[in-house]
Amino acid sequence: MGADREGGVRRPVRAVAYAVCGVVLLAGCATMPDSGDLRDVESTPRQDTEVRVFAMPPAEGAQPAEILQGFLEALTSDDPQYATARQYLTGAAARQWRPESSTTVLAGGPGIQADRRAGRDDTDDYAFTLTGSKVARVDEQQSYTPLAGPYSQPVHLTRDKKSRQWRIDVLPQGVVMGQSDFQRNYMSVNKYYFASGTWAESGTSATAVADPVYVRRRVDAMTQMVRSVLAGPTSWLEPVVRSSFPTGTALSGGVTALTPDDQNKLTVPLNGKAAGVGREKCGEMATQLLFTLQNLTPTVDTVELQADGSTLCALGLGEDRAGSVARRGSVKRSDYLYFVDDKHRLVRMSGAGVGAEPVPGALGEGVQPLGSAAVSWDERTAAGVSSDGKSLFVGSLVAGDPLEPPVLQSRGTTEDDRLTAPSWDVRGDLWVADRNPAQPQLLVLEQGAGKPLDVRVPGLNGRVDAVRVAADGVRIALVVRAKDDSKSLLIGRIERDDSSGDRPVVSVLELRSAAPELEDVTAMSWAGDSRLVVAGREQGGVQTMRYVQVDGSTPKGPAPAALTGVQSIAASEDDRLPLVAYSSEDGIVRLPSGAQWQKVVKDGWAPVYPG
């Protein structure tokens, strides 16, 4: 690089940290010349997540390079309002800088290149360029988006004519840091809203939808999350969900921090916009916060909402009170694991994993050989694709019911160019993709019957090779095969327009990558409210299995144990159920929590939980 040639070989320097009584101070005065060798600010090594990190203010007489390095290190501290970081800026720049507007994540710490033209000893100006490789961006709504490509942003410093101290007067908006610093400073938390058109007072329950956001880990995350819920859903999810909080609802004036009491109850004082809400609506509001805070910490099991000094309602987890207002994931815990046996029948196995039996009804009789199947969320109906991939059958799981004619047929010439495995949503609609190269389609059959609806997928570049609808019914995971035969995992938002006639127009919109590091996805399944498990291969690598978030980030925690030859995966939004997979080498295997893969049955394939 040009800076390397002018200033010599650049050597990495890490943020210098001092541990004092459990508090880490980032040294903003580390020695760094304003000429000669330039050294990048690398990400701080991972540290105990309970240790708080604070930055040091600029040292008297610090040179431009020292000021810039100190500022970058201050961005990785736990200073709630970035007060120390602002001390490295001029007064005007400090007033204009908005660190909350975004966080840009780089593969390593930001590189620093000097602009020699602005760095002459006889001037009061000094310019740098921050460089790096982009990994992701967290926007003002705290939503994570994977990125790629180079990062390059100018930074300018000026020397105050009176104090003769260098300060930054031009800088990019937001915050920039390396990936390991981001992982230390931020954490992903699901906040919750309700699927549009589902209501607690309808006699069933509203459907909760997870909306993952990233918050600063040690900067009062609880209050951050409450404010985030009140602010509303992220823009990607907003078209298909609703919030029960009235527009304009916020924390009451003067409330700066929220803390649960010794009974694990969190009292949330709201402004006047929430006053006068009915009991049903208040119950939904409390449920949104309770689901969100439970995802953050188990120390909150009751939420009390107040407005204008009066209690609106209180809701707790006892006796599943929140569960009576809204459901998360599937309607109920699955009774069985299902798969196709060596006789091409749909069979089921109890949670104990002992013995398999054909399902009641025609699909368990073997009259029609099956290659894949799906079972509805209520476990009353199943769908099966014929072993040649040509036909889709739907049948009840009731003994004696006959096999009905296929509800859909593909004209693809080979099995790989025909129907994918199907997937049910919570509405009772059945989704499947036809991979016929002459007319690839994503299709949905309302209540598993009738003429299929051709689902619109604007922006789709390739054909759909696999389909799984989330338990909330408003998000869908697709494995898409591009023209170069690479296969990627994309997440789309399901929208329905009922205004155009008797039948709705169904669309999957704003596709985004959930596993950007994998170029050949072979299998996937939903494995939580906002998490999937995916098997695939990185560029030039071997097959791997990992968990991914719907926003493309990597969730905290270990990946599943390695398994070779994975061709299909079955996971559940209910984390009490084990992960199950079909391996070409071992047949159907399962992974109980804290254990290794265990063989279930050698002669079987296509395992599924309901959905």
Image: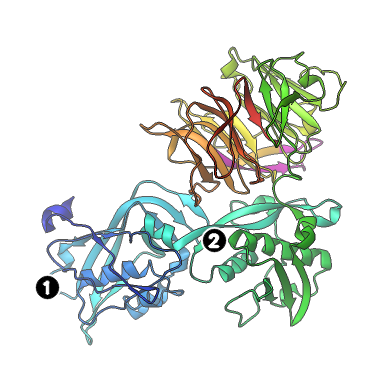
Residue 338's x, y, as percent?
70, 29
**Which one is nearer the viewer's eye here, 291 or 96?**
291
In the rendered view, how is the structure colored?
rainbow
What amino acid does circle 1 point to? Asp
Residue 43 among magenta residues: no
Q: Is residue 161 above or below residue 432?
A: below
SS under mark 1:
loop
- Label 1 Cα neighbours within 10 Å, binned few <14 / some 14-19 / many ≥20: few
- Label annotation for residue 141: 2
In magenta, the rendered stretch is: 490-505
Dot in front, 2 or 1: 2
Left or right of residue 198, residue 58 in this image: left
Residue 514 visible in the shown view = no
Q: Is residue 78 above or below residue 188?
A: below
- The Cα atoms of the two marked residues, 2 and 1, are separated by 43 Å
SS under mark 2:
loop
